[in-house]
Image (cartoon, grey):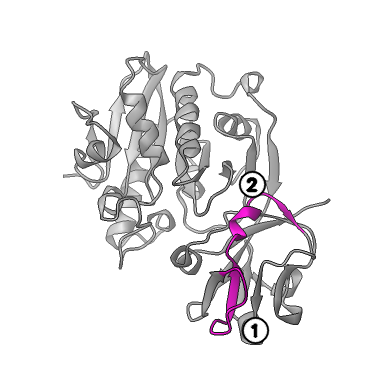
Amino acid sequence: MSLLPLIPAPEPLGNNVVEFLQQLPGPCCMYLPGRDSSRCRFVVTLLHGNEPSGSEAIFRLLQQPQQPVCDLYLAIMNVRAALTEPLFTYRQLPGMRDLNRCFRPPHADPEGQLANALMTLIHETRPEALIDLHNTSGNGPAFGVAVHLDSRHDALVSLFTERLIITDLRLGALMEMSERDVPTVTVECGGAQEEESHQIAFDGLQRFFTQENLFDLSEAPWPIEVLHNPVRLELTEDLRFSYSAARRSSDQLTLRVDIEHFNFGVVTPDTVLGWCDEEAATQLRIRNAGADVPLAEWFSTDGGELRPVRPLKLFMITARPDIARSDCLLYAVRCRL
């Protein structure tokens, strides 16, 4: 059997998204015939098993009788991680690689082979657009991410949200590779536990399924705010850190317990993001597209407090220690007040 079998939507769908996923053979791609079979569109979701909004939206849309405007391919990927108890907790299973870091060669391990199988299917089907649905690592508003800025990407993002990040970071993600074949946008729908995130995914996919011309910006429901070239604040593996309302002497870094509240807000040098000792300052790193840059260009640790050195807009802040350690704590872009 193919690493990514092409299947019809299961019948019946089940009573909820968990029952729906339990009927799937694992990672797979569903094919839905549309009114216009001369073209197709592609959706990918559940690359991370703890991000349910995309699969929730697909489950709801499959219950509707309306035929899509053109053929649709719906790839649902990390089913096993999503269904491992506690449900929708594991980004990837222990010992497995983050699937959305496996699209850059080599593809020697199982995750790389699965990523390559998805890329092969995208190349073969030649869709006119691709949406990759995610949830943010922490609570916060929805936004889109793309590696290229033009009116087509603006239009795709506007199906879901009014915020677009243009990134030059290269991490081995799907959108970096698929962009070569098809205009691609990653949509971060908001926090995984928020009903609003599921609704954003559902409403956006419904537009993606039914809008005749995806790239007609005259139909966009809101203007797009574009932010360019974020950096990542990453932690070294052996850094002792925690989240708390006050500094913990047992940790090298204590982050504010409410740090997620700064998602897509502007922080200034007056904003204390956490507390750290001298050793922690050497175990925090800023990563941009080219290489690591000095922490002091973005954040100060003077006086044992972690503060921005200039006005910044932060996003993808997480309060989950496992994600902060395995991926990053936050992304940041410079901004003006």
Residue carrying label 1: 277
In this view, the residue in front, 275 or 22, is: 275
Q: Is residue 273 magenta?
A: no
User: For the point 39% across and 42% down, which residue is it?
Assistant: 45
| Marks 1 and 2 close (CB-CB < 8 Å) | no
Q: Is residue 312 above or below residue 255?
A: above
User: For the point 61% across and 75% down, which residue is it?
Assistant: 284
Q: Earlier in the sequence, mark 1 or mark 2?
A: 2
SS under mark 1: loop
In this view, the residue in front, 71 or 14, is: 14
Q: Position of residue 4 (x, y in %)?
A: 26, 43
Whether residue 9 sits left or right of residue 287 in the image: it is left
In this view, the residue in front, 66 or 269, is: 269
Q: Position of residue 54 (x, y in %)?
A: 40, 38
Q: Is residue 315 above or below residue 194?
A: below
SS under mark 2: strand
In the rendered structure, find residue 172 and report the number of the disc placed on it: none
For the view shown, which residue lies furthest in the front direction?
Answer: 245
Q: Is residue 178 above or below residue 291?
A: above
Give the extent of the magenta segment. Answer: 244-267
